[in-house]
Amino acid sequence: MSLSSLKIMVRGGGEQATAVAHRLFQCNFRVLITETDHPEAVRREVAFCEAVYDGAKTVEGVTAQLINSTDDIFGMWQNNKIPLLIDPEARVKSVLKPDVIIDATIAKRNLGNTPNDARLVIGLGVGFTAGKDVHVVIETKRGHNLGRLIRQGEAAPDTGVPGEIMGYSIERVLRAPNDGLLNTHCKLGDIVQAGDEVADVDGTPVAAVIGGIVRGLLRDGTRVHKGMKSGDIDPRGVREYVYTISEKGRSIAGGTVEAILAEFNT
């Protein structure tokens, strides 16, 4: 089988899924993304799932286009775009018969994938067991093993603690103080100071703990629950980082490419 003829389905269009889909597209693979009808990406400028709302989303020169039918998949590939289909159950796999399925939903549980779904089934991070419900797990936890292929067993447990940037970890994350609707007061790319009100949830403020740039923020009007991650402040204050894939995403994407080549480039 020619590598260029491989059909790859990526479940999810959030930050990590986008990093993977972007890398695969750049490697000239044919990629399809499946998503829910109401995705909730925080780092929206680097999330192909925003195409659900806007019809298309371009990240670092690569465009994902929302399609309404499986009939549109091949046309998008011919037009050098990534088709994105609203299909949370991934029913399209029975029609497309992908060679590779990558679960990048970051749901922290298996959403029904089995090794029989494709010649190669990959799970990103926690929630999968390699050798049982997927063929390969990619480590997504920051550290020495980030991007490593796991062929037996599971990824490292999720600690719930974000990675450090300039010594800040949990301080970077904005969380909903209560259930309700998120009303945003800032835009992605805005500079804020500690104490600034970035948003509110039904009138209860969501304030920045540290100063920096608003790198991630849920869409205005998103229904949130108490403790839900709603935004991300980057203390480095570099505007470019808002619009570019992170080093973590690139490492995970590299591991995914390694898994595919190891299986098919024989």
Image (cartoon, rainbow, N blue to C red):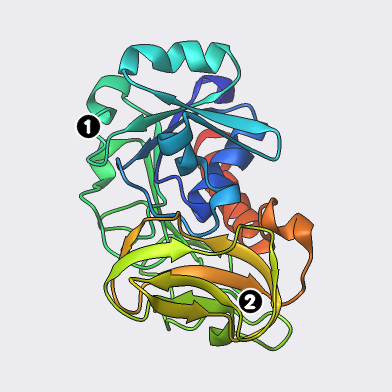
Q: Is residue 58 above or below residue 11?
A: above
Q: Do the numbered discs 1 and 2 sit on residues whose CB atoms are within 8 Å?
A: no
* Mark 1 or mark 2, earlier in chain: 1
Q: Position of residue 195 (x, y in %)?
A: 60, 86
Measured as percent of width and height from the top left, residue 253 is found at 59, 51
| Amino acid carrying mark 2 in the image | His
Mark 2 crowd level (few <14, some 14–19, many ≥20, 10 Å Cα):
few
Using the image, determine if residue 144 lies above or below residue 147: below
* Quadrant of the drawing holding the C terminus: top right
Percent x, y for residue 87? 27, 35
Q: Where does label 1 land, which residue? A: 91
227 and 182: which is toward the camera? 182
Of circles 1 and 2, the one toward us is 1
Q: Callout 1, which amino acid?
A: Arg
For marks 1 and 2, give the CA distance. 36 Å
Whether residue 93 is visible here, answered yes or no, is yes
Residue at image position (47%, 51%) is 14
The label on residue 144 is 2
Q: Secondary structure at mark 2?
A: loop
Q: Is residue 57 left or right of residue 128?
A: right
Locate residue 9: give its quadrant.
top left
**Residue at point 63% right, 51% down?**
254
Q: Specify the label residue 42 is tagged with.
A: none
Looking at the image, the residue that sits furthest to the front is 203
Residue 89, located in which quarter of the rendered image? top left
Q: Residues within 10 Å of mark 1 (few under 14, many from 20)?
A: few
